[in-house]
Image (spheres, grey):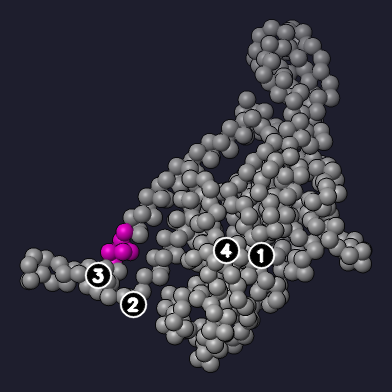
Amino acid sequence: MTRGARALVVYPSLRQRGAQIDTEARLDEAKGLALAIGLVVGDAIAIPIREPRAATLFGEGQVANIGIAATQNDADLIIVDGALTAIQQRNLEEKLKRKVIDRTGLILEIFGERAATAEGRLQVELAHLDYQAGRLVRSWTHLERQRGGFGFLGGPGETQIEADRRLIRDRMARIRRELEQVRRTRGLHRDRREKAPWPVVALVGYTNAGKSTLFNRLTGAAVMAEDLLFATLDPTMRSIRLPGIDKAILSDTVGFISELPTQLIAAFRATLEEVTAADVIVHVRDIANADSDAQKEQVLAILSDLGVTGGAGGEGEDPAIPLIEVWNKWDLLDPERAEDLRAVGPSRSETVVPLSALTGEGCDALLETISAMLTGDAREYAFTIAAADGQRLAWLHAHGEVLAEDAVSEAVIPAKDAGGEGPQVALRVRLTARELGRFARL
């Protein structure tokens, strides 16, 4: 795919269940994906489909109209903003005499260009190979049968297509082994954070919702933040201070999108596991977007697939990990719309913070909300610790709320109960369940 090439975007409008992104917004999103890879979009059209055709997805007349639109816009590339089977893609290319790519292929191209780390490149290559493995249709002469055996007497050997698939499978197996090593390393880092014991806050949300802008605002970092789909891919972590908590880790993850390719979800699972290990998830929404509700449903569906929530955001479903919903870009709302949102408010099961990551309005309220959620299940515990055990004493002072601390005579509490010989210290400390578990592992 050449940067600067002219493209025609075609959105097959199919009837689907659930909250759906508006057709115009879907076309704008598809154009944004094309622009993100440096393509020039000549036009974007929506074509309603009653019954998808197995051979071409579109009807014959619709395919002819697509060809006319491509000629009028001097487009060398047709982007179908939906999923195409290998046969449909090949047949459309033959009929339209142009390169055809579907939504999955386009997103894979973007990820391939943006991946910056070794892990990101491996994940993208794995997703590409998985996608290509199903696209090896027998449409070129080099896929005809190779000769097997000796001389002229050998029977037909494996087909070239089978050889290509075998090579792809072997390469995918090697990449999975490398990613498994990455996963183990990431797991060790998580274990280290568990011991360290700083709470982890993960930012998630639809792509271009403002996650990276909010991340920069809260941490003072300089993560790439542009009005561009998938501006950042690789997860970034920085430490932040919260009210009553000296240190927490804030993680910025890759943006979600409707119909995120299954190959990418599988390939980026090691990265997305960072979300499942978080103490609190902050779901950043572009509340000024007309399709904010549909985008929310898409994000919650992916979180459900990861086991973070019980389902696709239905009422009464408690998340496995505490979730805060951020209504970002509040400054872009007109007063009437803002008043309507305040009047409706969140449901009883939701925690919502309106803010503007660009101006900083509401960010202090978000930090206070995160802190309250992290310490909300705190209970009071009594400990007797050897006075010489400076590590555990310092840990309690750093990560818990010490309510009382008194020296205890050796004769009062046996050394085996106090955890050591010599002078003892009795403490009453307020800890969350997570902090208690971390303290027990010291």
Secondary structure type for disc 4: loop
Residue type for callout 2: Ser
Q: Main secondary structure of the magenta part?
A: helix
Could you tell me which residue is drawn at 79 percent across and 50 percent down?
A: 357
Secondary structure type for disc 2: loop
Image: magenta residue range:
162-167
Which mark is drawn over residue 315? none
- Above or below: residue 403 compared with residue 121: above
Residue that carries the numbered disc 3 in the rendered image: 159
Residue type for callout 3: Thr
Which mark is drawn over residue 298? 1
Residue that carries the numbered disc 2 in the rendered image: 139
| First in residue order: circle 2 vs circle 1 | 2
Residue type for callout 4: Gly
Residue type for callout 1: Gln
Q: CA distance from mark 4 to mark 1?
A: 26 Å
Q: CA distance from mark 3 to mark 2?
A: 13 Å
* Numbered-mark total: 4
Q: CA distance from mark 3 to mark 1?
A: 41 Å
Q: Quadrant of residue 125?
A: bottom left
| First in residue order: circle 4 vs circle 2 | 4
Q: Residue furthest bottom?
A: 61
Crowd around label 2: few <14 · some 14–19 · many ≥20 (10 Å): few
Front: mark 3 or 2: 2
Q: Is residue 60 left or right of residue 224?
A: left
Asked whether the beta carbons under mark 3 and mark 2 sit within 8 Å of each other, the answer is no
Query: Residue 330's spot in the image, x, y percent?
Result: 84, 58
